[in-house]
Amino acid sequence: MQQVEIITTAILLSWVAVVITLERYFPYRKGLPFFREGFWTDLVLYTLVQSYALKIIIFDFIILPLDQHYGFSKLHFVTGWPVWVQVLFFVITHDFYIYWFHRFQHSSPLFWRTHEAHHSGKQVDWLAGSRSHALEIIINQTIEFAPIILLGADPMVVPIKACIDAVWGIWIHCNINVKSGRLQYFINGPEMHLWHHADHEEVFYANFSTKFAFWDWLFGTAYLPDHKPQKWGLPYAFPKDYFSQHVFSVARFDEAALAQRSGWFRAYHGLRGRLLTRLTNRVPALRPLQGWPVPETHTSTVPAQRPGGNFTVAPAPPAAPAHLTPTAALPR
Ligand SMILES: [Zn+2]
Ligand SMILES: [Zn+2]
């Protein structure tokens, strides 16, 4: 491991510790459990396994062959720039791209399927941002890291940029009651992004920014009311399992009904629950590992008009079959 990677990993782990601590003392949503629903899926499958596997695919099987074929990096477009200027340049340009791609994902029924997993968590916290469909990561990180390598950036820029992404991703999803005042016009944070994850009609097409909030203010999609959302997640049933979530993006099905029909799926699907139950029966002190549901005041999407009226031109996310939408009609 290179020195810069050791430093960025240390920064990231320290940041996780700070954010987890602040979440306990200054929660945005009180009573949110640390081991909330989907915690293990997000930590083990999305954060560790998926990101490790996709890093190999993106760098070794997409970007490296591209560079070997075209040799752009030998042209050294940005090589002479100071490292901090390179980092700033790629942070701002990629953030501009991600605003528009994110906005497109919320408007295209096809691309919504690569993004709905990110919105599926009903309990949003520091780890929730890691839940992103594999294809979404492949598209976004290829577009993020290919220019860094093809334009001949300093090799340090990759780990530094990855660290900034992780730190900022944790920040905008964290369950901390932040009041950043005017800073929220520039720097994106949980105040606006926790609203983006809310199951409220008025934000289905708002708050697309990731790092810099000014894109939303500039392009008319900012939403920052003086109260908090009442409900988070999707307005339709979504699978809880990592693999089911990916299959669901291609073919809609009811995970609970499948578990009833198929013994094989039932055995696989309930495995983690059975193991955890067995463990906590033996060691009751470990019961928090199972998490517990946070009661929701609203069972369906909270309808509302945003100031100046709701967005009406954008198409709704793709409708799940009627039996998958017990709670609410999809947005229009
Ligand atoms: Zn989104
Ligand atoms: Zn998010």
Image (tube, helix red, strand yellow):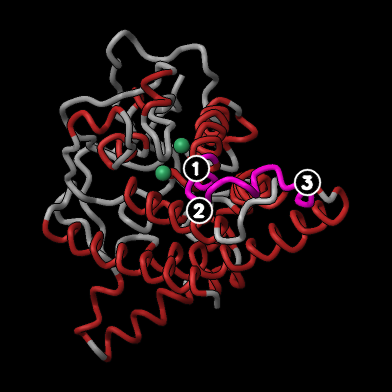
* Contact, mark 3 vs mark 1 (Cβ under 8 Å): no
Label 3 is placed on what type of residue? Leu
In the rendered image, which residue does mark 2 sit on? 161
Q: Which mark is first along the chain, 2 or 3?
A: 3
Front one among 250 and 33: 33
In the rendered image, which residue does mark 3 sit on? 75
Front one among 40 and 267: 40
* Contact, mark 1 vs mark 2 (Cβ under 8 Å): yes
Q: Nearer the viewer, mark 3 or mark 2?
A: 3
Measured Cα–Cα span from mark 3 to mark 2: 21 Å
In the rendered image, residue 46, in percent from the top left (x then y), is placed at 51, 62
Dot 3: what SS? helix
10 Å neighbourhood of mark 2: few (<14), some, or many (≥20)?
many
Q: Which mark is first along the chain, 1 or 3?
A: 3
10 Å neighbourhood of mark 3: few (<14), some, or many (≥20)?
few
Task: Point out the residue furthest to the left here.
Answer: 25
In the rendered image, residue 121, in percent from the top left (x then y), is placed at 39, 50
Quadrant location of the N terminus? bottom right
In the rendered image, which residue does mark 1 sit on? 91
Seen in the image, is 183 located left or right of residue 145? left
Dot 1: what SS? helix
Front one among 314 and 56: 56
| Magenta region | 73-89
